[in-house]
Image (cartoon, helix red, strand yellow):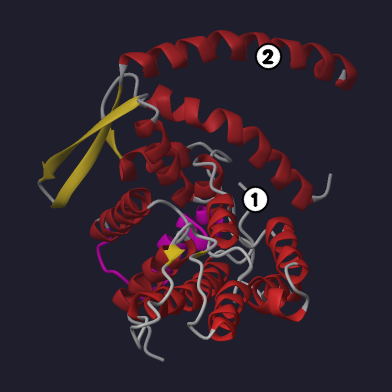
Amino acid sequence: MSTTPDKLVERYLKHLEVELDDLPHDRRREIVDEIAGHIAEARAVLEHETEADVRNILEGLGDPADIAADARERFDVRKPSPPGRAGWMDVAALVFLLVGGLIIPIFGWVIGVVLLWVSNAWNVRDKIIGTLFVPGGLLVPLGIGIIAVGNGGTSCSPVTGANGVTIGCPDASQGTPVLGIVALALLVLLPIVTTAYLAHQMRRHPAAATV
Amino acid sequence: MVAGKQDALLAQMLKGTLQYCVLALLSDDERYGFDLVRSLAETDGMVTSEGTIYPLLSRLRRDGLVETTWRESTSGPPRRYYWLTESGRAALDAFRGEWGRFRDAVDHFVERKAG
């Protein structure tokens, strides 16, 4: 590996940048720029720069991890917990939210909600989203679908979906209840999208504190 | 005392006091980072890793205790100069009073026992 002074400095600054990753962007920039300036100043006063000189300068600055630890403390930034493994409870929460209601009608979904709210993998906003879209998960569209098929389009009373959308009943004379099918499709898609969103958030905030 | 423990103790003591040493260095004249670090490093034991001065300076700036401006340098790229604001000066004065009392109080116990 070539270790010219420039390479050493470059590697040091890159390392520092990575270590400061969890600091707000402007603060990270400021610190890295100032330390880069410090290195340039220190190198400028050397008459005949050697690799050892540059190593001494970098050693004088200290380990990037120590600088980052100090910076976190100065700016009250909590060190993020190591990216993790989604707990099986979190995965179970998502499964129960989506299809729990089908396995154990209604109650299965309630289990999902409880698991969602006791988990620390999501913040409150995400938990609310997970609860509201859509209560019952796939139970609701499936239930409506069964009712619609059972009705066979002969007798019909308007069904109100859990999200407040009134699913119009197909006009008996009309063959294709377009509006009903669209609404049903939405009710199927929405819980799936919500689950995907929560799975995504869970990865992004592996152990975010409960807000 | 074990060397590691002594280092940790020094680090703890510096944590609360280093920023006032920086403010004091800035009280007469504006300075740039490298210059500040060099002055601090002249006194033995003041800085263990020089790089930690920069998060400190950044914090002082955000707290409004110092202000900065870029100035051209004759020998290289422009430098960011730091100087004390009014509230920086007030913080330094307040610390001077506290520190005097604190130092006397610690001396009162520590020196008597040593002697």
The rendered magenta stretch, by its main secondary structure, is classed as helix
The three-letter amino acid code for the residue at tag 1 is: Thr
The 10 Å Cα crowd at callout 1, few under 14, some 14 to 19, many 20 or more, is few
Is residue A58 part of the magenta span, yes or no? yes
Q: Badge 1 is on which residue?
A: A210
Q: Badge 2 is on which residue?
A: B102
Q: Quadrant of residue B97?
A: top right
Of the two numbered discs 2 and 1 in the rendering, the one whose residue sits closer to the viewer: 1
Left-right relation of A138 to A107: left
Of B45 and A20, which appears nearest the observer? A20
Estimate the x, y position of residue A178 in percent, counting from the top left.
34, 80
Estimate the x, y position of residue A155 in percent, counting from the top left.
52, 76
Secondary element under disc 1, as helix, strand or loop, is: loop
Farthest bottom residue? A1
Whole-Å distance between the Cαs marked 2 and 1?
A: 40 Å
Q: Is residue A53 visible?
A: no
Of A59 and B93, which appears nearest the observer? B93
Q: Is residue A55 above or below residue B61?
A: below
Task: Please report, as a chain letter, where disc 1 is located.
Answer: A
Q: Where's the C terminus of chain B, which quadrant? A: top right
The magenta segment: A46-68
Q: Is residue B41 above or below residue B29?
A: below
Residue at the image position 46 percent from the left and 42 percent from the top = B41
Residue at the image position 51 percent from the left and 67 percent from the top = A157
Estimate the x, y position of residue A200 in percent, counting from the top left.
51, 73
Estimate the x, y position of residue B16 in percent, counting from the top left.
59, 30
Residue at the image position 58 percent from the left and 50 percent from the top = A124
